[in-house]
Image: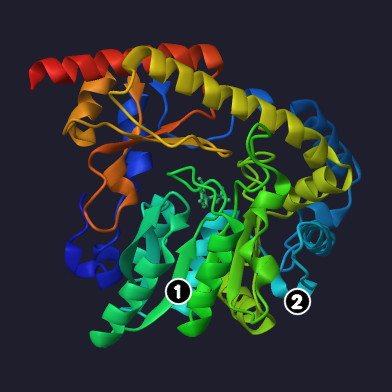
Amino acid sequence: MTTPDRYLSRAAMGFQESAIRAAGVLSARVPDLVSFAAGSPSPDLFPWDDLERVAADLLRSRDPAVLQYGATRGYRPLVEAIVTRLASAGVAVSHEMCVVTTGSQQGLDLAGRVLLDPGDVVLVELPTYSGAIAAFHNLQAALVGVAQDDDGMNPEALEEALVRLAREGRRARVVYLTPNFQNPSGLLMSLARRRALLAVAARHDLIILEDDPYGSLYFEDSATAADTRPLKADDTEGRVVYLGSISKTLVPGFRVAWLVAPPAIAARVELAKQAADLCSGVFDQRVVHRTLADGIVDRLAPGLRQAYQARRTTMEESLTAALGTRVAWRRPRGGFFLWVRLGDGRQADRLFPIALEHKVSFVTGAAFHVDGGGGDYVRLSFSAPTPARIREGVARLAAAIAHYDDGV
Ligand SMILES: Cc1ncc(COP(=O)(O)O)c(C=O)c1O
């Protein structure tokens, strides 16, 4: 039975399906597919034994709080552990500034609810994370794209967009940035660029929403922890709302993440979260707390950096061997993604069905653009498949591109 549209809110009528999830649904029907689509961490890097022990300990304790409702702000020892970790990354915050969220995807939604009225402008990079586009779009915000260069969002382009919006009488409220190994471009912003963007935000009285799920996944052949210093660390005016997550550095299944904001904003986020889900999963938070407190997350990190760096290199070498200079990308210095320009007028949406026939998938670049661009790009995630599967998937992709070129 279909629901007549007349029952739906205007906002719901405008909801958009995630392109990544849609690609996932199509891909699920293809047996033996190599998926470069989802930005999932690798399950063979999950610390299964540690998690089994921690979960069993918690359940064996019969502590009623382990399975009860919890505080909306989050399990207090977890909040304290997050505050301590942020301090070691140069971000000095207090626990009143911190809210545990159900994934940083919920952080994007809650921050949007607290900071945006319908029609308000959010400035995003071209390209930007498709999940952020969906969150702000569903809140009826207007998304305006700002060009990227090799160093991330270009501050002059941001300034120009702000001047143009002011001339049109439109209210820009928020700039959304992923300075560390951006999804999808893989870019790492320099510290100078971060400061330049903070200065523009200060001049125009904007909030910066800093999304940082990949910061600790830097590749040691070309980046260090110092290169990933959050903007929040240099936020002297309280204009950065920061999102961190355990999804990429432990496991995404717990849905544990955190939002850090000036206390007045954090208090409103808490109210929005009360209405959304009362609290994030308490058992999940307790497990994550123990993995932080027991040093499991820290012990895991060097191995993750090494493994993802090796997968990046495997994907780059395979692409170069199979396609030479026919496609192009900037070498990512961390994270999960290669943002590949197909070149020679090839269009990702036309390549996609051919790629599925060759049992390989990716996300088309248009999913990450708010200006209708990006059609000649694909995002290839190297995080989840093993190196052997990456080699196989790139060979299939090269065959799909050859097939595409034959048909043109
Ligand atoms: C930039 C960015 N932000 C947020 C998220 C959502 O992460 P979480 O699992 O913490 O909700 C992702 C996941 O891919 C992401 O790439």
Which amino acid type corresponds to the residue marked 2 in the rendered image? Glu
Q: Nearer the viewer, residue 148 or 240?
A: 148
Q: Residue at x 71, y 74 (%)?
A: 97
Which amino acid type corresponds to the residue marked 1 in the rendered image? Val
Q: Earlier in the sequence, mark 2 or mark 1?
A: 2
Q: Residue at x 81, y 40 (%)?
A: 298
Question: What x and y, as percent, mark residue 265?
Answer: 61, 80
In the picture of the structure, the residue carrying the numbered disc 2 is 96
Image height of 111 relative to 90, above or below: below
| Quarter in which the C terminus is drawn | top left
Q: CA distance from mark 2 to mark 1?
A: 22 Å
Q: Is residue 349 something that shows in the picture? A: yes
Q: How is the image coloured?
A: rainbow
Q: Is residue 386 left or right of residue 140?
A: right
Q: State which mark lies toward you, 2 or 1.
A: 1
Image height of 164 relative to 281, above or below: below
Q: Nearer the viewer, residue 325 or 71?
A: 325
The furthest residue to the left: 408
Q: Is residue 43 something that shows in the picture? A: no
Image height of 12 relative to 290, above or below: below
Question: What x and y, as percent, mark residue 314?
Answer: 52, 19
**Residue 235 shows which numbered tag?**
none
Question: What x and y, as percent, mark residue 162?
Answer: 35, 78
Question: What x and y, as percent, mark residue 141?
Answer: 34, 72
**Residue 174 shows which numbered tag?**
1
